[in-house]
Amino acid sequence: MSAGYNLSDNQGALKQEVAQRPQWLDSELYPFQSHLVEIDGNRIHYIDEGSGPILFFLHPSIGWSFMYADIIKELRTRFRCIALDLPGFGLSPAGPGYQHTLTNDSRLIERFIQMLGLTDVTLLAHDITGSIGLGVVGRRPEWFRAVIILLGFVWPLEEYPRVYRMVQLVGSPLFRDYLADLEQRLSAIQEMPALLIFGEADGLLKLGWLTRFEQMFPWHRSIVMPGCHHFPQVYDALGVATAIRRWWEEEIEP
């Protein structure tokens, strides 16, 4: 199916809005065509570049799809790269009353993938969106081919008190229930291939989170990026893109 095929009845208005990109957005740094799709009152902006196996990028709880611009420029000659902006981030205005929770964001991502008719997807997620995106993988494993995790967590955080205090909404029982359910769901799809990328200087590496992901996904390749902190896609975009390409060509489609 073509990207953005289902833009509801106000398709013309959405196209006009896409054409009016903000003046501050440098077209050389972000040289992609914009698309919009409406989901539950949110106008979701996304880019859809290249052709081939689908890489689906989820930005962390800060930033937007721009964070992956350099990686997408490197990989769009080999992959179909799709990256959206969550409601209220980047070029996606949030609908009235939309609240960011793991459940709400994960269901929105699920609806987005469904509306675009995407299958055989490789998810690339970072930080809390690892939990959000992998929630879709856990519920719809038949849609996915592999996962790429740039840091993140998919388990309850009580045993990590410093992280526990930092994560928004972690005091909610629903937050913990979501993560406990996710960890159980993912244990049932251990055959899913995974590329795990952590920054050498990220404190989460010392907490043993890479090892925990390795145990969760036995078919994995782990890469620790030298000199990188919590955002390897920013510190070394070329290195991340190269790691993805090599992993794909050597392990997924040799």
Image (cartoon, grey):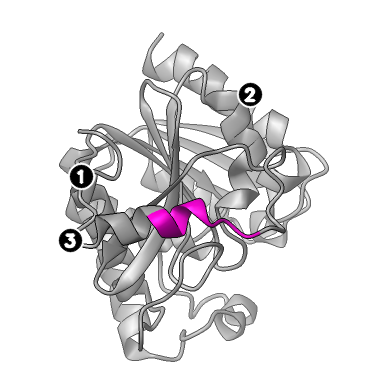
Q: Residues within 10 Å of mark 2 (few under 14, many from 20)?
A: some
Closest to the observer: 93 or 254? 93
Question: Which quadrant is home to the C terminus?
Answer: top left
Give the residue at mark 1. 141
Range of residues picked out in magenta: 16-22
Q: Residue at x 41, y 73 (%)?
A: 156
Q: Nearer the viewer, residue 107 or 72?
A: 72
Residue drawn at x 24%, y 44% as measured from the top left:
116
Q: Does residue 39 sit above or below 84 in this rendering?
A: below
Residue 19 among those drawn in magenta: yes
| Label 2 – label 3 distance at C-alpha | 41 Å
Name the one closer to the observer, 46 or 150.
46
* Residue type beneath disc 1: Pro
Magenta span includes 97: no
Pinpoint residue 151: horizontal percent, then vertical percent. 57, 53
Residue 77 in the image: x percent, y percent? 52, 18
Disc 1 residue crowd, few under 14, some 14–19, many 20+, Cα 10 Å: some
Residue at horizontal 52 percent and vertical 62 percent from the top = 91
Eye-nearest disc, 3 or 1: 3
Displayed quadrant of residue 41:
bottom left
> Residue 64 location in percent, x, y?
57, 58
Q: Which mark is residue 9?
A: 3
In space, the residues marked 1 and 2 are separated at their CA atoms by 26 Å
The residue under label 2 is: 242
Q: Is residue 223 visible?
A: no
Secondary structure beneath label 3? loop
Which residue is rendered at x = 28% and y = 41% of the image? 190
